[in-house]
Image (cartoon, rainbow, N blue to C red):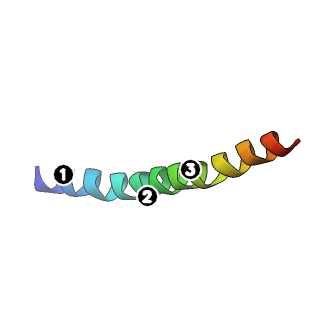
Amino acid sequence: NFFCHDVIYHLSLPFLGLTTITISLILIISPSLSMNEGTV
C-alpha cells in the first residue's frame, strides 16, 4: 500500500510540474497575443 502510494506520488509530481508550467506559459503568452491583436 505504501509502495503503491509512493509510485503514484512520484508519477504525479512531473505531471503537476508540467501542468503548472503550461498554465504559467498560457498566462504569460495570452496577454501578449491579445495586445498584438489589438495593435493590428
Q: Which residue is mark 3?
A: 27
Q: Residue 26 location, x and y as percent?
A: 59, 48
Residue type at mark 1 is: His
- Identify the element where label 2 is drawn: helix
Q: Of discs 2 and 3, which sits in the foreground?
A: 3
Specify the quadrant that holds the C terminus: top right
Q: Residue furthest right?
A: 40
Query: Is label 1 in contact with label 2 (beta carbons under 8 Å)?
Result: no
Q: Which mark is residue 5?
A: 1
Residue type at mark 2 is: Gly
Q: Which mark is residue 17?
A: 2
Q: CA distance from mark 2 to mark 3?
A: 15 Å
Residue under the point 21% across and 58% down? 6
Callout 2 crowding tier (Cα within 10 Å): few <14, some 14–19, many ≥20: few
Name the side, left or right, on which 21 lies relative to 29. Answer: left
Callout 1 crowding tier (Cα within 10 Å): few <14, some 14–19, many ≥20: few
Q: Of discs 1 and 3, which sits in the foreground?
A: 3
Q: Of discs 1 and 2, which sits in the foreground?
A: 2
Given residues 16 and 8, the one toward you in this image is 16
Residue type at mark 3 is: Leu
**Which of pointers 1 and 3 lies earlier in the amino acid sequence?**
1
Q: Residue 17 location, x and y as percent?
A: 43, 58
Name the side, left or right, on which 27 lies relative to 4. Answer: right
Name the side, left or right, on which 23 lies relative to 16. Answer: right
Given residues 16 and 26, the one toward you in this image is 26
- Identify the element where label 3 is drawn: helix
Name the side, left or right, on which 38 lies relative to 19. Answer: right
Residue under the point 72% across and 42% down? 34
